[in-house]
Amino acid sequence: MTSTLRGRPTRRSVLAGSAAIATGSFSVQVRAAPQAQKITPALIEAAKKEGKLSWYTSVDLPVAEKIAKAFEAAYPGVSMKVERSGAERIFQRIGQEYQSKIYNCDVVNSSDAAHLIIWKRASMLASFLPEDVAKYFPKEHWDPDGMYASWRVTLSPIAYNTSQVKAEDAPKGFNDLLDPKWVGKIVKAHPGYSGTIMTATQQLSRDLGWSYFEKLAKQKVMQVQSAADPPKKVTAGERAVMADGTEYMVNLLQSRGEPIEEVYAVEGTPLITGPSAVLARAANPNAARLFYAWSMTAEAQQLNVEVGALRSVHPLVRDRPERKKLSDIKTLREDAAAVADQADDIKARYLKLFKV
Amino acid sequence: MPGSSRSEAGSADLQVRSSIPEERTWRSALRFDLSRPVLLAVTALLAVMIVLPMGWLIAYSLSDKQGAVTLGNFVTLFTDPSFVDPLITTLIIAVSVSTICCLVAAPLGWLVARTDMPIRRIVRTLVMASLVTPPFVGAIAWEMLAAPNSGLLNQLWRSMTGMPADEALLDIYSLTGLIFVIACYTFPYVFILLANALDRMPGELEDASSMLGAKTWQTARRITVPLALPTLLAGALVAFLQALNLFGSPAILAIPAGFHTLTTRIWSLFQFPPKPELAAAASLPLLLLTILLLRGQALALGRRGYAVLGGKYGEPRLVRLGAWRWPAAALALLILAMPLFLPYAALFNSAFSRVASRLVTLDTITLHNVRFTFLELSSTMPALKNTFLLATLSATLGALLALLIAYIVSRRAVTGHRVLAFLATAPLAIPGIVLGVGLFLAYTRPPLTLYGTLWILLIAFITIELPAAYQQLSSAFHAVHPELEEAGRMLGASRLRTLADITAPLLRSAVIATWCFVFVAVIRELSAAVILFTSETKVLSVLIFDLKESGDVGAIAVLSLTMVAITTVVVAVANRFGGGREASRLPARAAG
C-alpha cells in the first residue's frame, strides 16, 4: 500500500535521489567543460523539422511574447508557445508534470536560480553550452557543466508613485518602509509565487533579519503574487510604494511615461539572476537548443534590454542609457544554493507573518 | 400465449396494466433489452467518476508523507492557525453571503413575481443574465471599481466630495468586500428559486385572505411569507454552499487583503512542495458540510410540497404598488447595477484603455489590449480551442449520460436504479476544488494516468455538471407519462423506436436546455480546472486566472468579455431552437 499510495517524490526525495546521482557519477564530474556550440545550419534544419517548442518562463508575459515573436522571425518555421507563470509555480508545475511523465517543457527560464541547481541535481537538464556563453559570459553566470546560464539579470528595488510621493519624502531604504506614514500604502509580491521575490526574501532576511518582515507585515501591506505586478499597482495609483518587484517592469512603465521612480535601497538592492536551461527530456530537443543558443546571443540579449528592460551579462550588450549602471548600484549578494535549502522554511515563515 | 408476437405481448400487458403496478409492466417489457449490462456499465462509469477520486481523497487524508495511516493531517487542520483561521473566515463568509442574498433576493423576487412593478420582466431576464458572469470575472471587475485607491468608484467619490487621496469610500480588498462580491453573484440563485416558487403559489389562498377582510400587507405577512419561507430557507442553503465552495473570487480578493479561505488554502497546498495529504484532509470538512446542508435543503424543500401540490390554481394576484411602482423599479435597477451594469462598464473601460484605473476617453481609446490578446498572446487560441472542445464534449456527453440515467431511473427500468439516482446526484455534494484534488490524486498514477490530457478535465466537468443535468432531465421524464411510450410499444414499435419517435421529440427542449446549461457552466468553471490543467490543456478560465496573477488587466478584460459574449450567444441560440422556458431555468448549482 505504501508504495502505490506514495507515488509522488517530494523535495526531500528529489534531493535524496540527486545526492545518489551526485556520488554515483563522480567520474562524470571530473570531465572537461563541454564544448561550446555554434548555431549550425544542421541545428536550424533539425529545429525546423520539429517546427515548434514550448518555453516556460517567469518573465513578464508581454515581454516573453515579444521575444518569442523575434525568435520566430529569426527562424521562420519554428513556432513558439510561451507558458508564463510565477517561477515558483513553474517549478511546481514542471515537477508535477514530470511525475506524471509529461514532458511539455522544452526550454525553461526561472527567476529563482535555486531551481536550476535542484533540476541539475535531479538530472533533468541537458548539457548544451552556446558559443556566446562560453566566449563572453562571466564564469559565475554559467554552469561549468553547461547545464544553464544567466539569460537575464534584474533587481528588486523599492519604487514609488511620483504623483503621490515627493522625491524627498520617498523611502531611501527598506527600514524607511517601516515608518507609520506608509501604513496601508505599500504593495509587495509573494515568495510562494515569484522567484524574484523568493530570492529577494532570502537576501533580505539574511541581511536585515526576519524582524524586518515582522514589522513590514504590520504595515497593512497589499499582497500581490507576481513580482511584475507591484509596479503596475503603483502606476495605477492603487498603492504609493512598492516594497519589492522587478526593476525591469518599473523601467518599462517609466518609458511609457507612467509616474514611477525606483529607489536603490541604502541597505543594498536584491540582485536576481534568471538562468535558462534546455530540459533533458525536451520533446523538441533541436528547437530547444536553437532557441536557447539564440537567446544568449548579443543580438537577443540586446533585445532583452530594449523590449524587456532586463539587464544582461553579455559584455557586447549596451544597457539602457537612462538608468543607473549595474556596477554603480549597491546590490545584496545572491546565494542560490542557500535559497535551494531554505525555500520551504521561507515560505512557511512568510505565511505565518503575512497570513497568505 | 405461445409464440406470441410483440404486439400480442403488448396487448397482454395492456390487459393486466390496470391490475399490476407499472413497475412490473416495465420489467417484463425489458426482457428484450440489454438493460442489465447498460446498468452495470453506467454504474461502473459513475463509480470511476465519483467513487474513485473520493476514495483516494479519504485515503490521502488519512496518511502521512510516507503513506502510513495517521490522523495527523486532521490534527494539523484543527490546530494550526494557518488552517483554523481560513476555516473560520470561510464560515463567516458563507453565513454573511447567505443572509445578504436572502435580504436582497426576497424583496426583489416578490417585486418581480407578485407586484405590478414596471419593467419586471426585464429585471427578471437581467438577473438571469448576471448568472452568465463567472464569479471570478465579477471579482476582477469589482477590483477595477472599488480598489481603495485606484478603483473608479472611489476616484469618482473623491472628485465629488473632495475626500483626501489616502481615504477610501470602498475597500474591496477586505472581508466585507469579498462578502459583497460573492453575494452579487450568488443572490440570483436565491432569486430564481424564490421567484419561481412565488409564481407557482396559488392565488386562491391570497384571494381568500383578502375576501376575509385582510389588508394587502396582512395577507403578505400571514399568507405569502409563510408559504415562501421553505423556499427562502432552501435558497439560503444554496447561497451558503456557493459561498462555502467558491474559489475564484476569494483567490482574487482575499490574497491581496492578506487572508485565506479554505478553498484558496487548499489551492496553496499545491505550491511546491505539494502537500496532497493536507489538501485532502482540508477538503473533507467542505465535503461533509456540503452533504449535511444538502440533506437540510432536501428537508426544507420537501416541506414545500403542501403548498404547490394539486391541480392548476388561478394566476397569482398582483399586488398594486401604486405610487411605489417607480421607486420599486429604481431599487431593482440599483440592485442590478451591482452584478451587472457597474462591473461590465469597468470591464469595457479597461478592455479599451491602457491603464484600467483611468476612464477611457475618445483620445485615449486603444485597441492595444485586443491586439495583444488575439495576436501576441500565444495561449489565447489554444485556450479557446480547448475550452470549446471541452464545453461541447461535456455538454453532449453529459446530456446523453444524464438522459440515460434519467430514463432508467424514471422508468424504473432495472432493479437498482436508485443507486444510479444517488450516484448521479452525489457530485452536488462535492465542491469543485475538492473534486479537482480527488481527480488529481486518482489519475496521476497508473493504470489511468489521465493528468495532462483533456480527458481528466472532461471527466471533471461532466461529473460536476451531472447532478444539474440529471435533475433537469429527470423532471422532464416525469412529465412524459409512460402511457405514451406504451402506446407506441403496443403498436409494434421497438423500445428504441418508441424512444426515438415519441419520447425524444417530447424531451427535445429539455435536452437542449440541459446541453446549454452544461456548456455555459463548463466555460466558466475554474475551481477544478485550476488544479487539473497543464500548459497543454489550459482553458480560458485558467488563462484569465493566470493573467490576473501578473496583473495584465487589459487582456483579462478582453478575454472575459469574449467569454461572456460567446456564452450569451450560445444561450440565445439554444433558446431560439427550442430551449424555451427550460433554458432559463438554471439549476441551483454554479461553478467557480
Image (tube, coloured by chain):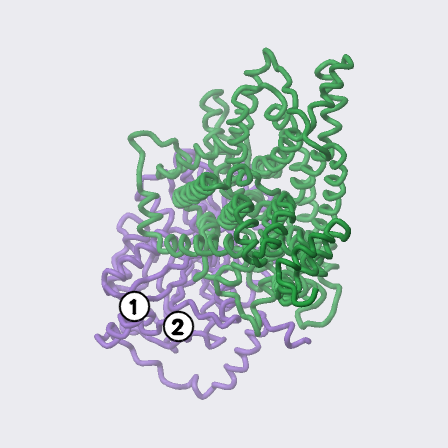
Chain colours: A purple, B green
Q: Which residue is mark 1?
A: A51
Residue B169 vs B244, above or below: the answer is above
Q: From the viewer's perspective, is residue B178 above or below residue B277?
A: above
Task: Bin the neighbour count of mark 2 within 10 Å (Cα to Cα): few under 14, some 14-19, many 20 and up.
Answer: many
Q: Amino acid at mark 2?
A: Ala
Foreground residue among A178 and A134: A134
Would you identify the image quadrant in which residue B223 lies?
top right
Q: Residue at x 27, y 73 (%)?
A: A131
The residue sitting at the bottom extreme is A27
Q: Residue under mark 2: which chain is it in?
A: A
Circle 2 sits in a helix, a strand or a loop, which is it?
A: loop
Q: At which x and y percent is residue B316?
A: 65, 24
The single residue placed furthest to the left in the displayed view is A41
Q: Residue at x 42, y 54 (%)?
A: B383
Task: Pinpoint residue A260: horizontal percent, then vertical percent.
Answer: 38, 41
Q: Assign the N terminus of chain A to one quadrant of the image.
A: bottom right
Q: Quadrant of residue A257?
A: top left
Mark earlier in primary sequence (1, 2): 1
Instruction: Give left or right: position of B57 versus A341.
Output: right
